[in-house]
Image (spheres, grey):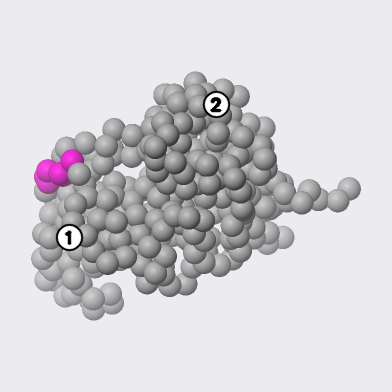
Amino acid sequence: MSSPAHGPSSGKIRILSANTRGFSEKKADKIKSMMENNQIDLVVLQECNGKVAFEQFKGFSIMSSPEAPYCDDVVFPKDPSKNYQDEHRFKVPKDLAGGAKDYVVIARAGSSMKVEPIDFQPEKSQKVKDYLTDNKPGSGTASRGSTPPVDDSKLKALGLRPPQLMSISVPGFQSITLLNYHAPQSGGTTNGYSGMGAKLGHEIVQRVVGELSGDKILIGDQNAHHSSLRLGYPSADIVSATGDDLVHAVASKGLKATEIKLGSEGKAFQNKASEECSDHAPLAVEISLTASLA
């Protein structure tokens, strides 16, 4: 029997991403239609309402988590060189922490694909520690007994809206990490980003992504232009949504990510004037998993 052309059991996974700007039965119907018409295996949503999603996608495997888990206060360690054991409390401005919306991941029930949540822990990243202290990688500053000071202007980056992380595994293939990301926006402007918060958020996320093992894909409303992501993720493939400068997938080259054209459905979903749609375009990609070593 020949292997299927699509589907997780073949090593090919189709992912649909959308910033839904809230959620409703009509928006759910549009997402379901795009799923069926494009053989989508996995849906990742930003600015969603997890409770409504659970009601509208009964029979699917659903995981939801708040986009802004930190609320008002975040406890940061004072000294990154000491494994963040000392605490420092920092009040996160609401425009940096995000709003009361949810990340949602929807997978088809009964699939050979297994999707499991992973904690996002930038405080354990050596590259993040070096960034927060302006410590040059490999300089050995901490090992000589001195403590590099934390740059307070960068410390707030740890309180920004984080991505939702998932481990995706299929029998016979190497597992990958998926990051469902609605990058923070905040006020102000900077070249290549929609808000100062987006640039600061990617400073943290790109360092965590760089230390993740195996293939990975960062997908969602990045609040960043293609050229900015290319600078932050130089070795990755970047697939951008048609008609939207801020929605992208950043994928390991081994995943061979390609865009799935959503046609008129995708174009119609980007309609800020309609409560049934969103102000951002959806993005669908197909990725190819690497076979496990025998």
Q: Residue at x 11, y 59 (%)?
A: 152
Q: How many labels does the image show?
A: 2
7 within the magenta span: no
Image point (13%, 63%), residue name: 151
Q: In the image, which disc is placed on residue 244?
A: none
Residue at the image position 64 percent from the left and 58 percent from the top: 288
Single out the residue that lies furthest toward the bottom. Answer: 139
Q: Position of residue 272 (x, y in %)?
A: 39, 40
The quarter of the picture where the C terminus appears is: bottom right
Q: Read off the residue under disc 1.
A: 154
Give the residue number, with chain letter if any, for mark 2: 57
- The answer to whether 229 appears left or right of 109 in the picture is left
Can residue 96 be spotted in the picture?
yes
In the rendered image of this protein, does residue 25 appear above or below residue 266?
above
- The residue nearer to you, when weighing 139 against 34, is 34
Q: How crowded is mark 2: few (under 14 residues within 10 Å), some or many (20 or more)?
A: some
Asked if residue 116 shows in the view, the reply is no
Which range is magenta?
89-94
SS state under label 1 = helix
Which image quarter: residue 273?
A: top left
Residue type, label 1: Lys
Quadrant of residue 31 in the image?
top right
Nearer the observer, 141 or 30: 30
Could you tell me which secondary element the residue under label 2 belongs to?
A: loop
The location of residue 58, given as percent across then percent down, is: 56, 23
